[in-house]
Structures are given as structure tokens and as C-alpha cells.
Image: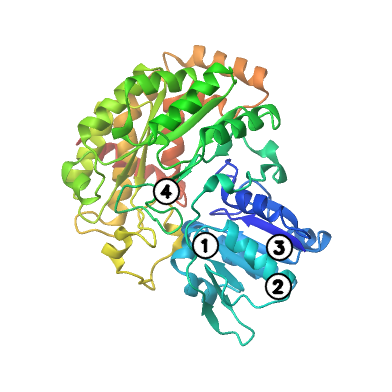
Amino acid sequence: MNILLANMPMTFNRRENLEPPLGICYIGGMLKTMKGAVVHLKDFEVADYSPESLRAYLAERSIDVVGVSFRTASYGSAKRFVTDVKSFRRDIFVAAGGHHATAFPRETLADMRCDAVIVGEGEYAFKDVIGRLQERASLAGVPGVVFRDADNRVIANPPRQPIENIDDLPWPSRELLDLGSYNVMTLLTSRGCPFDCIYCDKGVSTRAVKYRSADGIFEEIRYLVSTLHKNRLYVVDDHFFLNKKKLREVLDRIIREKLPVQWTCQARVDGITADILAAAREAGCEQIMFGIETGDESELKYIRKSSTLKQAEEAVRLTKKAGIRARANFMLGFPVSTKETVKNTIRFARRIKPDIVRFFAVSPLPNTDLWDDIYGKGVIPPWVKWEELDFFKPSFNIKDLPREELSLYVTAGYWHVLKNDFLLEATLFFIPKLLRLLYLTARTGRLRGNISKCFPRSVNLIVDNMHQLSGKSFKEAVSFIRQVLRLERTF
């Protein structure tokens, strides 16, 4: 049986996310253990797409089953992809999975031409689906699967229990991807997050945290470096610093065996200490991304972050002191936000001086308390456009801040925090930074990645401004930036 596992982008042929998709890689690793299963992976974040090329790919490999993984903002791409698959051959079995499909399995089946939805973690569920298809048996009773039966009725099987021991999972089958398309390798060391933030979807990754063994983590890192020759990693755990004992075991092993690896991770601000940062730096940590989310006390309480602004400021300070880049992520435009609370967040971001700052427009995701607060539990308003839930442009109006005005605040935030450094990089430091860029490009053979190393604040400002300017004419863009600069002066 020939199986294609495909990862969906927000927009085809855009190449916005250059990180290997672990979801389909883990499922691929599981399916490779099955007799008679030939597995193919395709990441359309980096691969070209057209209906014609898809038909040729499916025909050349005689694909029998397609698994499509997507998030809410890539729903439109997934729907188009499934339509193109079924237009080529209706008998190809298509299963959908991921956070969005888990939140709305029946609705996904009704709107797409897929045959089944995998709800929750997909490794064992998809393996069971393939087993049933190989036996030409019904999917009835397979836990964690919603499907159409022979009479086109939607059948929802009982939920599947969460995977207890993730060390039992085969390693992700990254080797089935075009690894030359990626600058970094993704790595998962735990699943789950015990915290209760209002905007977080726990439909796939639950509040019960499951950890891999330190030995298993280290051996996979060594495999990535020694076998795949990839030494830049992104640890995708919700909070890599949560289990400090296990973390320290991994860091000490990297240091002791002098593994030449550089890595980035996500962490909460309340899990940071000077000693663990020192070890992380010695073990190759380049950057830590902190989800600070807000610089306003009332918003912090609303989102149930369970951390303080003082902890956020201290975490950024300690991280930078340790020689690690500190990236601070913020969200603007909660249902309780006002112009003043948004300004408080932007002022706070400037005060704590992170190396990189990101301002995201609040995007309520299905299966979260934030979604329920705005739209109602399980409700899909007819005006919601999934592609707008991308965290770049505002997707809903709040009383004090219409969507159009919030876009101005998002953009003005970048100018308020970054403009002084941007001007320095563009004038006084331009020549030395340009010479460094030419040197790094000649040494590494690539421009992407080196520009942000040499002109970090400029890239931060310009790239993130482009998200708000997309779709605007030149005249509209000029008018928008003028409004942004006027607004920024009021901070």
C-alpha cells in the first residue's frame, strides 16, 4: 500500500515556514514499521504545488492513501489539496488530521471530500486505519477516528486514550523529506503543557506532560548531527525548561561529548534561572523564545498566564546576560483590550529590550477558551474565514479597537521598539554590517539567515511590517505607514 503524508501551508508556493513538520514525520516513522506500507512525505511549505504536478506525483507512485495535516490558517490549502486528490482519483482514501480537524471533525468531513478524520495524536490511530484498509475492513471501532461509512453516514468512534510513553514512538522519518530545503531540524522532547492559558489548544497536546528519556533525546540529537549532518535545531516543546532535571541531563551530555549543535527553544518566563541558562549556552543554545503575550496586568489575568511582568523582565535580562538571544512574543487585541492596555504592552516590550520582538494579532483558535469566549463553544460563525486566523492581521473586532485600527497598533509596536536600532543599522553601522554579510554569505553559500544575523533589527521591523502591508496598493501602504508613525508618537 502506497501512502502519502502531506503537510499543508497557509498559502501554496510561498515558502513561509522552513521547519520540518514533525507531525507527518512521526506518523511516517510509525507507518514504516508496518509490513506492506510504502511511505512518502511531502511538505508543501517548501515544495512547489500545482494540480498538474500533484496528479503526476500520485500517478508515478500509485498512491492509495493520503494523509493531510493542517492547522486552522491552512484550512483553505488543505481543502484545495483534497479536492485535487479526489479529482484525480476518487478511490484514493484521504484522512485529515491536526489541531483544526481534531476540533471540528464532523464539520471537516462535511466540508472536505476526505474519508476520515484522525482526532488527537495520530501515530497509532493512523496505523490502525492503514491496518483496516489493508484488510479491506471497516473503520468501525477504531478509537480516535471519525469516518464516512459505506452508506456515507458520519460515524464517530470513541476517543483514543493519549499516548502514555512517547519513548515508544519510532523516531520521525525526516529522511523522507527534502532535507536540503530546511535550515534547521525540529526536535520534540516532550508533549503537553500543564498550564491553562486561555488561547492554547490542548486537543492534541494535553495538559498532562509526557517526557522522553534523556538518553533518547541525546541519541536523536546525535543522529541529526552525525547522520543527517544537521547541527541547527529548533526544540518545539511548549516549555523546554519545564523539567530541569531531565533538561540538565541532556545539556550535560551535549557538553561532555562536545556535540557541535546550535539550538533554539521555547520557554516560559517563570522557568528561567541563571545556572540553567549558563548550561544551555555552553550546550549550544542560541535563542530562547518567550511567550510573554502582554505587558498589561489586567490582560495577564484575563489570559490566565500564571506568570508576572517582573518574571518576564527578569527572564529577558538573564537570557541576554548569558549570551543567548531573547525573543519576546506578544499578542495584541484580546476581547478585554483597550487602546491603553495595548499601549502598555508595547511600552513594556520596549522597556525590557528583547533582541527580537514579535507582535501578533490575537487569533482565537478552535478548541480554546478564547474561541468559546468570543464565538461560543463549538460554534462556527458563518463570517469566520479560516485563513484570517494567521496571527498576523486582526480577525475580529473589539469594542475599543476595530480591526483596521488594531493593525495600526500592531505595526506601530514594531516602530516604537525597533526604530532607533533600525536607523543605526541603516546609517552609522551599515558599512561594517554589509561587509560582515558579504563574508558570511561567501562562507556559507546562502543569503537567507545571514541577513538577519547582520541586520537583526532591520529585518525584524521590515519583515513584520510586510504582513500588515500585504494586499495594499502602494498608495494605501504609504497612507498606512503615515498613520502608523503618527500613532507611534503617542506612545
> Which mark sits nearer the N-terminus, 3 or 1?
3
The N terminus: image quadrant:
bottom right
> Which mark sits nearer the N-terminus, 4 or 2?
2
Look at label 1 and name its amino acid: Tyr
> Which mark sits nearer the N-terminus, 4 or 3?
3
Inspect this view and state whether residue 171 appears.
yes
Cα separation, mark 4 vs mark 3, equals 37 Å
Residue 466 at x, y percent in the picture: 45, 42
Identify which residue is drawn at 59% across, 79% down.
Answer: 148
List the residue tagged with mark 4: 192
> Which mark sits nearer the N-terminus, 3 or 2?
3
Residue 287 at x, y percent in the picture: 44, 27
> Which mark sits nearer the N-terminus, 1 or 4?
1
Cα separation, mark 1 vs mark 4, equals 24 Å
- Closest to the observer: 460 or 103? 103
Cα separation, mark 1 vs mark 2, equals 18 Å
Task: Answer whether labels 3 and 2 touch (C-beta < 8 Å).
Answer: yes
Which residue reaches farthest bottom? Answer: 151
Look at label 2 and name its amino acid: Ser
List the residue tagged with mark 3: 51
List the residue tagged with mark 2: 87
Image height of 115 relative to 103, above or below: below
List the residue tagged with mark 1: 75
Identify which residue is drawn at 62% across, 75% down.
Answer: 139
Res 217 → quadrant: top right
In front: label 4 or label 3: 4
Look at label 4 and name its amino acid: Gly
Look at label 3 and name its amino acid: Pro
Inspect this view and state whether residue 13 appears.
no
For disc 2, the neighbor class at 10 Å (few under 14, some 14 to 19, many from 20) is: some
